[in-house]
Image (spheres, rainbow, N blue to C red):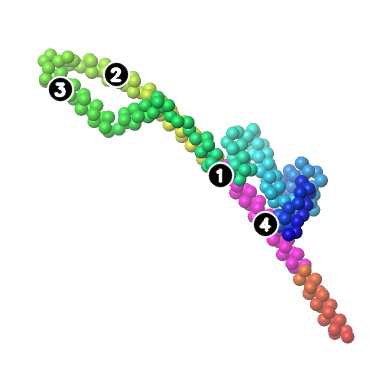
Amino acid sequence: MNTFRSDISGREFPDVERVYGNSIKAPLLEFIRKIYPDFTEQSSLSITELNTFRSEFLAQTMQQQIGELDELSRTVLESLRDQTLLSDKLEENADAPLTLGQQLADRVAEFGGSWTFIIAFGIFILCWIAVNVYLLRPGFDPYPFILLNLLLSCLAAIQAPIIMMSQNRQDEKDRDRSRKDYMINLKAEVEIRMLHEKIDHLMMKQQQHLLAIQQEQIEMLGQILDKISDKHTR
């Protein structure tokens, strides 16, 4: 198998992985020259090394646009460099197990916002009124049901902050889900850019092969024409 020596690292790679400097887009080529000033359009490197430079170039571009890379962008770039699925990294950072207080808040919020609670509480209030108005005379909580109002006020005072705790945790989950969606969209955008770069490289390389084949065909036609002209002169 034919090999070549990279002008970047000096290592040998298969010849099919060779990429010439003249087939690299100007911004990326300038970025490579900042690190390796001796790299010219006639120099060559492997596609693996080129992908590494692409990742670094995209990181620098993102850093210039956003300012300083945040944790989300770093996670995306690490996923691109390691060739791993971003969903695996997101699962590693999954939510911690719920505490007893969080589980209790979720259950109270779930029950308090259901028709079961509304119906049961309505039946309880009707029974309370019926007992104090019709069954017991005088009742233990006669009209205007001051004790019932006290119980309702205490229930509302306790139930409201518990439901708010559950809602706050749900808001945190929504923000975390939004961050994950942003990371996935960011990685998709970066990979699409890299895919465009690879397609452009393949098209440039194919054009170079076609030009080489055409030159060979022209030389062969020239040789055939020379032989034909020699026969005619004889």
Q: Is residue 132 visible?
A: yes
Q: Which range is magenta?
A: 186-215
- Local crowd size for mark 1, using a 10 Å CA cut-off: few (<14), some (14–19), many (≥20): few
The answer to whether residue 225 is magenta is no
Disc 3 from disc 1: Cα separation: 64 Å
* SS under mark 2: helix
Q: Which residue is mark 4?
A: 202
Label ID, residue 130: 3
Which amino acid type is shown beneath numbered disc 4? Leu
User: Which residue shows up at 52% across the image and 35% down it?
Assistant: 93
Q: Which residue is mark 2?
A: 153
Q: Main secondary structure of the magenta part?
A: helix
* SS under mark 4: helix
| Corner quadrant of residue 102 | top left
Q: Which residue is mark 1?
A: 85
Q: Position of residue 30 (x, y in %)?
A: 75, 45
Q: Earlier in the sequence, mark 4 or mark 3?
A: 3
Instruction: Select label 4 or label 2 by which is in front.
Output: 4
For the residues labelled 2 and 1, say whether their Cβ atoms are less than 8 Å apart: no
